[in-house]
């Protein structure tokens, strides 16, 4: 009679599968991956005493990337496949007649959520994109982090209902968010960041299917794709793209 595998049998099976896929290489994980599991740890550290070498370079468990990856390659080969929120937000921005670069801002506003680190996602997203987009676009992406917590009746933006569900009725934004909002609301690009919130679709319309092809021309005109490929291009954000490409490099 078949029985369910125990925890340790499952762990053994996982380890066997990794060995099959990785040869004899040991995978190391950054502190951040362990912290997300509630562990203040570096895991197997550098594999001392195991007699194994560490996985360094391309990870055979992940889809292979071209030598000179583009933004769309990262969307396809690294980012989480849950991209409808970004596509529908950009679609709405386009329908609302926003300028192309703001459509791009809406398309990329949560790039850190689906593609890098969720905490402080506006800041991480802006930093990833800064070398490749208009300054106003990355500023707006950074500032939507704080603005989404504050209503602006002049453009019909109310505090999102789903934040009450997700964070509770009594959630108060942290002081750094409140301070950033005070700075943002007097900035010349305030309304650009606010437009990201206005077009930030919190509830998907399952009947609307938006494909990335709809925005490929806008990306081509407003995202400065480096010919060497993201990560190979020596900008202040190249290392972030490289880390996404090879997230388990031990150093
Ligand atoms: Fe966001
Ligand atoms: Fe969003």
Image (spheres, helix red, strand yellow):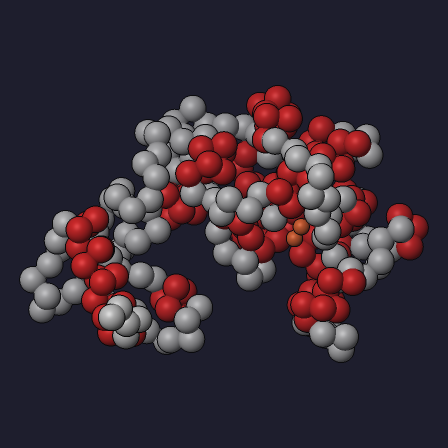
Q: Residue at x 55, y 41 (%)?
A: 129
Residue situated in front as seen by the camera: 148 or 162: 162
Q: Is residue 55 in view?
A: yes
Q: Residue at x 64, y 51 (%)?
A: 142
Instruction: Check the image and report above or below for 237 versus 149.
Output: above
> How far across and down, in percent of the image, does residue 214 sit?
64, 26
The image quadrant that residue 17 belongs to is bottom left
Extreme residue in the left direction: 51
Instruction: Check the image and report above or below for 45 versus 118.
Output: below
Q: Quadrant of the N terminus?
A: bottom left
> How far across and down, in percent of the image, does residue 6 sit?
28, 74
Specify whether 154 is left or right of 206.
Answer: right
The image quadrant that residue 53 belongs to is bottom left
Q: Residue at x 61, y 48 (%)?
A: 110
Q: Residue at x 14, y 49 (%)?
A: 23
> How far across and down, in percent of the image, does residue 230 sit?
43, 35
Extreme residue in the front direction: 1
The image quadrant that residue 98 belongs to is top right
Residue situated in front as seen by the camera: 176 or 245: 245
Specify whether 225 is left or right of 35.
Answer: right
> How far across and down, in percent of the image, does residue 27 sit?
24, 57
Instruction: Check the image and report above or below for 63 versus 142.
Output: above
Q: Is residue 25 in view?
A: no
Q: How many marks?
A: 0
Specify whether 138 is left or right of 148.
Answer: left
Residue situated in front as seen by the camera: 50 or 99: 50
Specify whether 147 is left or right of 74.
Answer: right
Q: Quadrant of the C terminus?
A: bottom left
């Amino acid at each position: 009679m078949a029985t369910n595998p125990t925890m340790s049998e499952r762990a053994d099976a996982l380890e066997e599968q990794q060995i099959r896929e990785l040869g004899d290489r040991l995978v190391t994980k950054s502190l951040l991956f362990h912290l997300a599991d509630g562990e203040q740890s570096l895991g197997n550290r550098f594999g001392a005493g195991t007699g194994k070498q560490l996985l360094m370079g391309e990870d055979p468990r992940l889809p292979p990337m071209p030598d000179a990856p583009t933004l769309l390659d990262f969307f396809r080969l690294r980012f989480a496949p849950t991209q409808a929120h970004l596509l529908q937000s950009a679609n709405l921005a386009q329908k609302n007649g926003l300028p192309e670069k703001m459509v791009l801002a809406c398309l990329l506003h949560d790039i850190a959520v689906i593609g890098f680190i969720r905490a402080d996602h506006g800041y991480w997203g802006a930093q990833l994109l800064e070398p490749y987009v208009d300054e106003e676009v990355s500023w707006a992406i950074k500032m939507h982090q704080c603005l989404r917590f504050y209503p602006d009746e002049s453009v019909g933006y109310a505090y999102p209902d789903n934040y009450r569900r997700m964070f509770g009725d009594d959630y108060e934004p942290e002081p750094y968010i409140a301070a950033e909002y005070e700075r943002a609301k007097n900035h010349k690009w305030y309304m650009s960041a606010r437009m990201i919130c206005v077009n930030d679709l919190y509830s998907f319309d399952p009947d609307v299917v938006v494909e990335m092809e709809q925005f490929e021309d806008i990306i081509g005109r407003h995202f400065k794709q480096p010919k060497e490929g993201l990560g190979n291009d020596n900008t202040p954000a190249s290392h972030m793209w490289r880390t996404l490409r090879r997230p388990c490099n031990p150093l």
